[in-house]
């Protein structure tokens, strides 16, 4: 019996030694598998277009009909006839302005809420009430205040981008170990040095998480806002092309919006990696 168990253990060891996990393939993981996912979407598009072809174009038809937009993204053929590149720039300008204004307000406010309990008790109910409000519900209020579409859109982006950054910043500040704060107090470190040398470095990952969420929501909201306010922008382009029953251009806009959102998140993640990057401590010999 013991010999049989030993023999089984030997066979199991040999099997583990000979059975190797397949090595990760960069080509497969980064090219082939994503390509299969996009191929599935295109096949689904063909299937839907085959059923509703009176309105829905096939992918190759959409590509051919959008060649002018793709090849000439920055054309100017009149006051209201601009290339999709100009429309994208107009939307990005509104989003970045509103997002940066929101970050300037949200990060310090998050620090105050995370560091002072009275501020938490005073502001948390306000945040919890305003946070679930749909961004578009702020648009009539913004139009009443500014009476112009462009600043109203920026104001809606500003309001939208506040909440994730405030909440994540406050969470990061409150998560800093009390031991570090106690040591700083024992060393009689000034409050501003505590904030800059201890709390801020520990909170940076939380801050950037909030910023990335806020930027994603801001880019999502600007399309809906521009549909309602009109003017120059990628959102109004979508609504205008749908009004003309031109789904070819709508599909192009959807692709551009998605790729732009991906690029914005990637760029912010690179900023996060640069800001939070720390060099390994050097060791001295002697």
Image (spheres, rainbow, N blue to C red):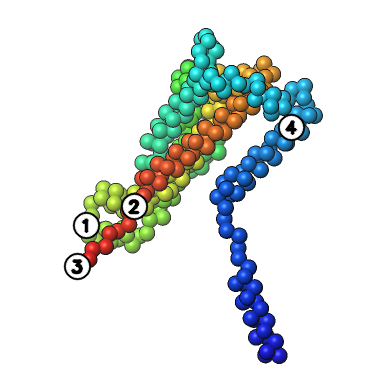
Q: Which mark is residue 188?
A: 1
Residue at label 4?
46
Visible residue check, residue 123: no
Give neighbour class at mark 2: few <14, some 14-19, many 20+ (Cα, 10 Å): few
Q: Residue at x 60, y 49 (%)?
A: 28
Quadrant housing residue 269: top left
Q: Where is residue 42 drawn, in percent x and y? A: 69, 35
Give neighbour class at mark 1: few <14, some 14-19, many 20+ (Cα, 10 Å): few
Mark before the other along the chain sequence, 4 or 3: 4
What kind of element bears circle 2?
loop
Could you give the CA–CA distance between mark 4 and mark 3, rounded to whole angstroms?
71 Å
Residue at label 2?
278
Relative to the observer, which residue lies in front, 20 or 83?
Answer: 20
Could you give the CA–CA distance between mark 3 and mark 2, rounded to whole angstroms?
25 Å
Q: Are marks 3 and 2 in contact (CB under 8 Å)?
A: no
Mark before the other along the chain sequence, 1 or 2: 1
Could you give the CA–CA distance between mark 1 and mark 2, rounded to whole angstroms?
26 Å
Visible residue check, residue 27: yes
Mark before the other along the chain sequence, 1 or 3: 1
Residue at label 3?
286
What kind of element bears circle 3?
loop
Relative to the observer, which residue lies in front, 216 or 229?
Answer: 216
Could you give the CA–CA distance between mark 1 and mark 3, rounded to whole angstroms?
33 Å
Give neighbour class at mark 3: few <14, some 14-19, many 20+ (Cα, 10 Å): few
Could you give the CA–CA distance between mark 4 and mark 2, rounded to whole angstroms?
49 Å
Q: Where is residue 119 drawn, in percent x and y? A: 39, 45
Compared to residue 181, the image places residue 164 above or below, namely above
Q: Residue at x 29, y 51 (%)?
A: 197
Mark before the other along the chain sequence, 3 or 2: 2
């Amino acid at each position: 019996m013991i010999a049989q168990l030993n023999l089984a253990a030997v066979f199991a060891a040999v099997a583990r030694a000979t059975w190797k996990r397949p090595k990760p393939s960069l080509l497969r993981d980064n090219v082939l598998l994503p390509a299969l996912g996009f191929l599935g979407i295109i096949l689904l598009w063909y299937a839907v277009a085959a059923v509703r072809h009176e309105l829905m174009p096939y992918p190759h038809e959409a590509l051919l009909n959008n060649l002018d937009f793709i090849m000439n993204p920055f054309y100017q053929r009149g006051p209201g006839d601009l290339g999709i590149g100009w429309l994208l720039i107009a939307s990005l300008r509104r989003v970045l302005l509103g997002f940066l204004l929101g970050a300037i307000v949200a990060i310090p406010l998050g620090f105050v809420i995370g560091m002072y309990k009275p501020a938490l008790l005073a502001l948390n109910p306000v945040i919890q009430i305003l946070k679930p409000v749909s961004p578009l519900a702020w648009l009539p209020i913004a139009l009443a205040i500014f009476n112009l579409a462009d600043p109203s859109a920026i104001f809606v982006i500003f309001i939208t981008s506040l909440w994730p950054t405030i909440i994540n910043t406050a969470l990061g500040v409150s998560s800093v170990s009390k031991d570090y704060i106690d040591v700083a107090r024992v060393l009689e470190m000034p409050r501003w040095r505590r904030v800059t040398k201890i709390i801020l470095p520990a909170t940076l990952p939380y801050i950037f998480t909030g910023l990335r969420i806020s930027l994603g929501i801001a880019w999502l909201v600007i399309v809906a806002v521009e549909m309602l306010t009109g003017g120059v922008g990628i959102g109004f382009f979508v609504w205008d092309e749908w009004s003309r029953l031109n789904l070819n251009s709508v599909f192009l806009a959807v692709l551009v919006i998605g790729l732009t959102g991906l690029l914005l998140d990637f760029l912010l993640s690179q900023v996060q990696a640069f800001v939070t990057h720390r060099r390994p401590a050097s060791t001295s010999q002697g």
